[in-house]
Amino acid sequence: MYTMKILEREPALSHFLSAHLPPQWGRALSSAPAGRADLVVVSPDLIQVPSAPTACRALLAPGSLAHLAGELSAAWVVSYGLTPRDTLTFSSLGQDTLCLALQRELVTLSGDCLEPQEWPLPRQSQASPLFLLACAGLQLLLGVPPAEVRLGQGSGASLST
């Protein structure tokens, strides 16, 4: 199992991820800022990096908070957001469906490489688009194939690492 941490001001994203990911993944997410982790997820509400930030292999962060990424020690960064500069974004966002767009190569924690691509998903939650992108990015980094990424209640493929 990979070690995962979340950096956030309020626990909204961690609550969302716990509700929308398989139970074993939700339990693996820690909000403790110190220590090494395989994956650190930065919430869109983060204002500043903790004084003892977590070092990590992969950092999943909103593109709008790119200025904070320089304060964290990460082997690679994947940005998510609603702009063309973000690695993971939406090419369309409707009431019932959305289309995720991986705009640049993404390396998973296991070292697999995902090429740029788009794929449609049913929109099973009216949550913040940034929370949906963080959920999708987390699954991709953990090795869930794009066709198996889910954003609904308690969804997501099971993964034994």
Image (cartoon, rainbow, N blue to C red):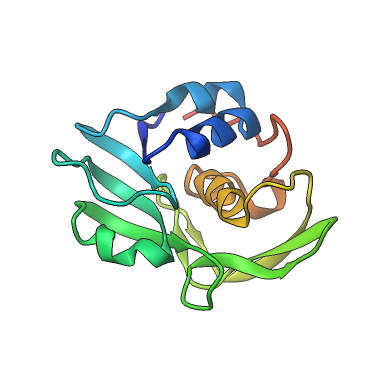
Q: Is residue 76 above or below residue 54?
A: below
Q: Position of residue 33 (x, y in %)?
A: 25, 34
Q: Is residue 161 above or below residue 43?
A: above
At 82% across and 58% down in the image, what residue appears? Answer: 97
Tell me the quarter of the image containing the N terminus.
Answer: top left
Q: How many marks?
A: 0
Q: Nearer the viewer, residue 148 or 50?
A: 50
Q: Nearer the viewer, residue 154 or 119?
A: 154
Q: Residue furthest left?
A: 51
Q: Position of residue 118 (x, y in %)?
A: 68, 68
At 55% across and 44% down in the image, what residue appears? Answer: 139
Judged left or right of residue 45, residue 12 is: right
At 57% across and 48% down in the image, what residue appears? Answer: 131
At 44% across and 52% down in the image, what residue appears? Answer: 44
Q: Nearer the viewer, residue 110 or 43?
A: 43
Q: Residue furthest right?
A: 96
- Give the image quarter of residue 76: bottom left
- Give the image quarter of residue 64: bottom left
Q: Position of residue 40 (x, y in %)?
A: 35, 43
- Give the image quarter of residue 68: bottom left
Q: Residue furthest bottom?
A: 84
Q: Position of residue 103 (x, y in %)?
A: 54, 73
